Amino acid sequence: MQTAWLDEQNIIRVDFAETDDKPINEPIIKDNKNHFQVDSIHWDNKTATIKLVEFLPMDNSLYIEWNDVEIPIYPRDIVRSPIFDQMYDASKELLGANYSPDQTTFSVWSPIASNMVLVLVDETYQMSRNSNGVWSKTIDQDCHLMSYYFKITVHGKEEKVNDPYAKSMTANSQEAVVIDVRQFDPDDFRKVPSPDIRKEETIIYELHIRDATVAKSSGVKHRGKFLGLTERETTNPENYSTGLSYIRELGCTHVQLLPVQDFARVNELKPDKTYNWGYDPLYYFVPEGSFSTDPKDPKVRIKELKQMIQAFHEENLSVILDVVFNHVFEHETSAFEKLVPGYYFRYTKDGQVSNATGTGNDLATERKMVRKFILDCVDYLLTEYRIDGFRFDLMGIIDVETMRMIRNRCEQEDRSILLLGEGWEMDTPLSSTQKSTISQSDQLCEISFFNDRFRDIMKGNIGDPTDKGFTNGNGHYIERLPQLVSGSSQSRYGDAIFSDPLQSVNYVECHDNHTLWDRLQLSNPNATAETQKRMHQLATGITILSQGIPFIHAGQEFYRTKQGDDNSYIAGDSINQLDWYRREKEDHYVQWVRNLIQLRKNYRLLRLGDTEEIKHRLHTIFAPDPVFGYLLAGAREDLAIFINPANYAMKIEKPAAGRWKKLLSNYFGSEGMNDYVLEPKSEIKAYELVIYHKRRRS
């Protein structure tokens, strides 16, 4: 059976089966009205490449008469051409199921479909096609909570496809559901103000919905659910705070949630049997059903996600969503591929689907309708769920122009929207200047990047679990510390990564790779547990005290362990759940992190947010190797910070004479705290981080 493909506007390729003989007559290319003149035919084994004298129309009426056989011509590589994007640009169309009580209009973009049928519950309706490739049908009745899907005919085959713009789904993403999303706002959802947090005040706490409360020790009723993070004053059996109350007490300003949009690999009807971080996206507008108390009811997941967001807002916590706009779970079975095969994904020069993400596909964010989809989703999450920020997974896959347009949309809000992402350089078919990588940070002002240099210098290169950094390697890389603590934005300290310190997201641990505690077991196996804890405290402390945006992984503040698993994305609750008994056991560390966070909030010197002011106020202090010290010089007060990554005590000298008060140390006892120190020299203990404060004379 022959198949003919339109790969360019004047190029057709015809594939013949091994059993087919090459035709001896000339092909006739035609549509319902015209014949098209053949320029040349080139054979490569069983594939004929036919070049036409003129450009062909891109519609579904083209066919070839050849060898007494009529062969339909289907669009293939042409869908990735600029002309296709231009001809079928539907960027201004309202897609999805757009509901009102009197009628619902269903709209879906598929320029190459030869037919589209709406299936609403058990009724079928023929849809009509616009010139820009949008198929639509208006149903004049109240369609609220009705399930629907489309029967699409593409490349001569009919199959079922769900609406990529669906706002809710039946369990396990079987069918889309028409829904009046606003109807399920909790009481006062739009009246509770979003937290008013300036960017330089940001402190991020990364959390997975299920991990947060699924353990029995959480004391939460709705364990592992959206609602679990609405419950207040929960405790473990020994009366130590857990869940939402614990997060509030810790003092971070933003909770960054691992993906909450509909994802694969978890059976929503049996959520306790499987586990997933959520980086297998299915339907981007739909909340994940396994986090709801009733995945069979399409309205419950919407209401409960909103209830959780409202609970965070009521506790003055902003909500960042981790969004995965770089790939889909399976490109072959995705709604995108079914609607317009070959369009939504990038391809390599040899015609293969690009796989820089390592997940089997890269979304082609630079194409008009992919970009529209992403922008529509961002707009929807801002408007309907009142989200306060977005963390872009593998942001280096996304093109710069799309990220700029996202930034511009977020700037229209009447509140601060935080944007950050992974700016890794990845081998996707885009030029380096088009990728949203750290090297392009000057093109993406107001967008922040995870600072992998900070991470690796603090604890060792992520690619080698035995490698050591400053905190666990006796001061290794000490010469790079001035740059790190200044937000990686100071040319005076060598190669600055950012022109704005608030583009630097400083971290030593996140959901990926080993937790810091597990890493220390590998990099420093001969150290005592007490020494490993001190190293851990140094790394966390420097993260919170450095210029830029501090980022803490949930449980980092009580030495979170995943039992050595460095990629726990499907590892289950026993590995991933927060251990609220461990939180109790390590409460001294929790209290110290709380104090560090409060210190950062109390002193503007720790969160300057301006490159020139940092240059003026931050200065390194001479200290015995390998101690690192730096001064933050204010108009009325100074802070001096010293970090000793060695296993022995040393003498340090204050940067100036005066009454220095010891504010905080990771030696948790109260001895010496808030005492004034007049002597120019004092002792810094092994693996100690200490902060001194001095008021200036008026």
Image (spheres, rainbow, N blue to C red):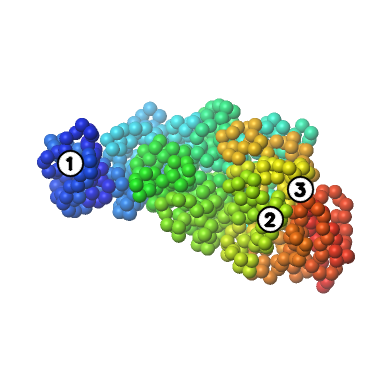
Give the quadrant of the C terminus: bottom right
Residue 469: tell me if it is visible. Answer: yes
State the SS at label 2: loop
Amino acid at pointer 2: His
| Image quadrant in which the N terminus is located | top left
The mark lying in front, picked from 1 and 3, is 3
- Circle 2 or circle 1, nearest the eye: 2
* Quarter of image, res 581: top right
Q: Residues within 10 Å of mark 1 (few under 14, many from 20)?
A: many
Question: Which residue corresponds to mark 2?
Answer: 476
Few, some or many residues within 10 Å of mark 2 (<14, 14–19, 20+): some
Q: Which label number is shown at residue 64?
A: 1
Can you say whether 580 is above or below 538 in the image? above
**Residue type beneath disc 3:** Arg
Look at the image and tell me whether residue 203 can be seen: no
Residue 534, numbered circle: 3
Residue at x 69% of width, y 59% of height: 478
Q: Which is more N-terminal, label 2 or label 3?
A: 2
User: On the picture, is 21 further left or further right than 147?
Assistant: left
* Kind of residue at disc 1: Ile
Is tag 1's residue or tag 3's residue first in the polypeptide sequence?
A: 1
